[in-house]
Image (tube, helix red, strand yellow):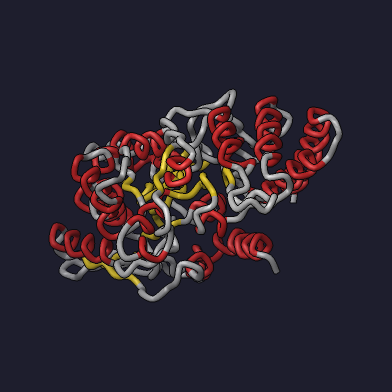
Amino acid sequence: MNEVKRRNIVFSILGSVLFLAALAVLRRGSLAPAGKEEVITIGIFSDSYWEVQNGYSYQILEDAITLFEKENPGVKVEYVSGILKSDYPEWLSEQIILGKAPDVFLVFGDNFSDLAEIGALKSLDALVEEDREFSSEVFYASALACGKYQEEQYALPYECAPRLMFVNKTILDAEGIAVPEKDWTWDEFYEICKAVTKDMDGNGTADQFGVTDYTWSEAFDSNGVQLFNESGSECYLADERVKEAILFMERLEGLCEGYQVTNRDFDLGKVAFRPMLFSEYRAYKSYPLSIKKYSSFDWECISMPAGESGSNRSQLDTLMIAMNENTAHKQTAWKFMKLLAADERMQEEIFDYSEGVSVLKAVTESEKTRQLLIEDSGKNSRFNLSILSDAVENAVVTYRFRNYEEALIEVDKAVRDIMEGNANISMQQTIWNREINRLLKNKMEE
């Protein structure tokens, strides 16, 4: 059973039983009698969200618990350790079904809309409105928007990572090409890829290339394409900006004359560009991981190139914090969520103990953060903090809905079919758009 089907089955079960479970099971951890400790529980996993080596997975939480219990006498914070990231979504689903979900828990972007739809997450709108000490303005707008579902706030952002373009500076230097500025365009991107794609060993076959891992998804994002409406009832594949992106992808792929450039080629120093999450940049720019990967060439990160009708925007991967709809400790849980997400003391630790980026503008754009990132990147790095802050602030916020992954698979099939065929692109867009809309309608009626 593939991952999409398994996830749909899990959340279908959740949707059916959550209401009954909430009624039938006594809410764990009810308010303690006077003189007794109030206990809130936290859902977390043991390894890095960014899938790189990290020996500090609980450090920020432990520091937050120590501070929270000191500032809130009579409250104890507990969590279950040892749950792997790969097992965490299924573990959380099981806890929700059993009526034993933690009061506060981390939520992956891929699972957020499903959990909100089935009623597993408490809406935070009333808490935000009533809390005069809380301000949504401290967050990057795009990161905060990742926690919205149907115009209601169901989660706070905890840490994030934008998708940026990684540049092999060694190749560009050898070719006498300057590293692009942050407002560069598709045309500049194409011309550089064309210039560096060549046969270096004289055997008649190109062995140095322009780019790998750049897909229609990156092209759509940087050309202002919105694929679906928020509810997931309509697809916009027939948009003219989609056609522009497809034509650009055809030109770009044509440079390789049928050769499939791989990430391995980039690792070996044979490719000029590759999109990656900023978390990978942080992980592999720092010692000792810098010795294990990308050590044979100098590399840096810049913004994504802007399309004809778009800008230098890309996706943002955001790890969020949500509250159990059935918690008996709403106010205490809210205070702890704010400490993790909105307190600069905790958010500064993101840069110390994780590979992600703080969701607070004041933390990410601080001089302390700039110095830390320069130190991690090496003294010869040309890293520009404004590239990072702009990428987060202006990131594309994707509307996720039930069956989103299945719809995305159909879009991928459509784009591949259009690019590999010889038919009129606009006509093919219309045909595929009609087919995907039919799929969306059928899924909504199930």
Most foreground residue, 301 or 229: 301
Q: Position of residue 316 (x, y in %)?
A: 46, 44
Is 3 displayed left or right of 332 in the figure? right
Most foreground residue, 62 or 48: 48
Residue visible at 33% across and 44% down in the picture: 359
- Whether 355 is drawn above or below 86: the answer is above
Q: In this rendering, does residue 107 appear at all?
A: yes
Is 121 displayed left or right of 283 in the figure? right
In this rendering, the count of numbered labels is: 0
Q: Quadrant of residue 64?
A: bottom left
Most foreground residue, 139 or 322: 139
Residue visible at 39% across and 64% down in the picture: 48
Q: Position of residue 51 (x, y in %)?
A: 44, 63
Q: In this rendering, does residue 331 appear at all?
A: no
Q: Quadrant of residue 291?
A: bottom left
Q: Quadrant of the N terminus?
A: bottom right
Residue visible at 46% across and 34% down in the picture: 177
Q: Quadrant of residue 4?
A: bottom right
- Whether 67 is drawn above or below 403: the answer is below
Most foreground residue, 251 or 65: 251
Residue visible at 32% across and 34% down in the picture: 386
Is 291 displayed left or right of 343 in the figure? right
Residue at far bottom of view: 82
